[in-house]
Amino acid sequence: MGTALIYDEEMTKYKLLWVDPVCKIEVPERLTVSHDALVRSGLADRCVSIPVREATDADILLVHSEEYLEAVKKTPYLTLEDLKEFTLQYGDVYFHPNIYHCAKLAAGAALQLVDSVMTGKVRNGMALVRPPGHHSMRSAANGFCVFNNVAIAAKYAKQKYGLQRVLIVDWDIHHGQGVQYSFEDDPSVLYFSWHRYEHQKFWPQLRESDYDCVGKEKGAGFNINVPWNKVGMQNSDYLAVFSHVLLPVAYEFCPDLVLVCAGFDSAIGDPEGEMCATPDIFAHLTHLLMNLAGGKLCAVLEGGYNLTSLAQSVCQTVHTLLGDPAPRPSNINSPCKSALESLHCTRSAHKKYWSCLKYAADLPDFELSTKRIKLAEEEEEKLEKGEEAITKKEEVWPEPPKRVAPLVRTALVLPDGVACPDGCKRFSLSENLNPLIANKLRENFLKAADDSDALSTLSTLIALVEKMVKNEICSGLALVRDVSMATMCVVQHAATALSNRVLVVCVGDGTVPSQITEDGKSLVVHISRKEPEEQKCKYYVPVCLKKGSSEVSGFLQAMFGLLLPLGYEYDPSLVLLVRMPDSGMCDSVWQQLTGLLQGLAQGHTLVLMQESEKARVDPTASSLVGNAPPSLGPLHAPLPEDVESLESLRRRLQTDWKLLQTTAPESGRGDDH
């Protein structure tokens, strides 16, 4: 269906006309470098260009007061002195004779994007806009923002398309208080924001930006704040919050549309954020949101003031919206202590509102390591010692890796008589198998010396894996006679002959040979109804769900709380997804699993299923080629025994796998990365 890109050079035609140290970073180049990078990389040409329109008064009045709109309407006719005077009414913002026009275009661009996605003209898209919007309030400009673009878009989408639930994800480094105020009593809009906070010392310095501000009245629980109380957050911290807070709640909420306040001041090198997350992390954050709402996702630019990391982050986001495989995640390690404290507090504050968080730990009974009083004492000590201000070192980071999509997106190994779905390529051996490999297969896997069909299938699988490793094919699907044998064959060849790390995800009660994990070259996560034996190795993770994968809520708990964090930390170069004959998993959940796992290993995912699973070929292939699965619908609470089992397993594993942590240690492990 395509990806929309909305941009108009007109939105660069305003700038600060006087000296203001706070506002000097909001410059027209923010837009031009972002768009130029998309053009240079060829991404702009691959997108569907949608023209901008001005938002109407009626659109703007969905969020803002008539008095405020009328006041802003007069700004094109004010003198420079009058503009300065007008600006003083508001905080950290500036006006220009052309800003009212640009603000109408910015809000209108967000609405054009919503229209394009909701009418099916495109699947998703990004609007490069200026001025940004998430700080502006009902009757006030604020933080470079005039009209609240995303809040207007959310209300417009609900009104025009009758949407019941809208998710707004704000990954800008500042708290979008304007969005929060717009929806704090509205349970039809779930607003999530992480933001630099430092116990209310960082702008906008609002008490209501803290983790315990969860919304009001009927909207209680629908406002999620994750405050960053230290700078220097890394990719691991961002992924931990997505895995353990945002994704479980978002799936329980089940949005009809996802809107992203896409501020890239949360990327490395930004003078406002002072964070250390690299631009490639936005490829992963975007990917993790794309299975929600049937893929209907609209990203609208907010902040971003380092022109290099801004442009790189925009490109990473658009690459993913276009369906390009995400790069291997970089710098994945343990979340820092301060991030874990914030994660712990947010989960605890929302446990009474969301069944997926019901068993989250209570608030910590120790003082947070970054408590404001401690920060204040440190500042006083520095002053007393007469220390000179420390010059901030300039961050340096490598350019994100080039994202090259393989010529073949999805290749299928199918028995005769099974049709190959549209968008996929049937795969077969194009040349004779290496005799050494053939002999090895016969020795290790084939009991009957004359089993030529099995030899042919296993040989074809090996050839397919080798093409995937060379990035000639992105993903694959094979119907095989014996999934256990095929799994062993692929893992052994990938881990030994190709020196690849393989994440094996098995769903169902079949037997998984545990010996394939002994050397750490493969990590097996086996989700079944079987009570697991004692865990012998950190690389074999048996997950028991009482109803198996047919219990949707419990399966999602396992996916977000265990599988994704394990996968990201292990960082495989190949994902092997194995569906056992008795998995009992419905198509929509299977498609969610298949889609989410493609964020790993540059999308190199090979799915193995029994020949009897012919009915699963079309839905699986649909997910492998990048189509979003249908929404799962409202979820009921997972079985208590499943949650207790998963929590017990997660706590046991977190010593070896740090991304599984959801609570802060009272002492011990360092405060910083």
Image: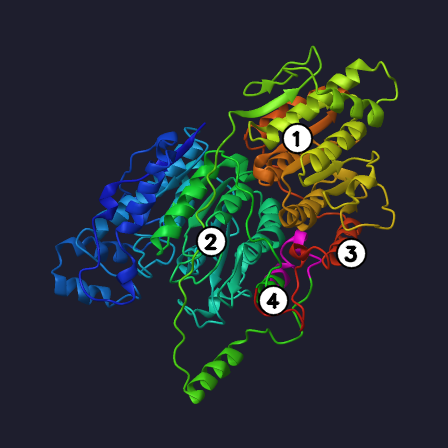
Do we see residue 465 in this rendering?
Answer: yes
* Span highlighted in magenta in the image: 345-360
Q: Which residue is mark 4?
A: 337
What x and y, as percent, mark residue 601?
60, 39
Q: CA distance from mark 2 to mark 1?
A: 32 Å
What x and y, as percent, mark residue 127?
36, 42
Q: In the rendered image, which quarter is residue 481 located in?
A: top right
Q: Which residue is mark 3?
A: 648
The numbered dot on residue 32 is: none
Tell how many labels. 4
Q: CA distance from mark 4 to mark 2?
A: 20 Å
For marks 2 and 1 on the same chain, the one whose residue lies earlier in the sequence: 2
* Magenta segment includes 351: yes
The numbered dot on residue 171 is: 2
Do we see residue 155 in this rendering?
Answer: no
Q: Which residue is mark 1?
A: 606
For residue 556, side relative to residue 132 (left or right): right
Element assignment for label 2? loop
Residue depth check, mark 4 versus mark 3: number of the one nearer the observer: 4
For the N terminus, the image quarter is top left
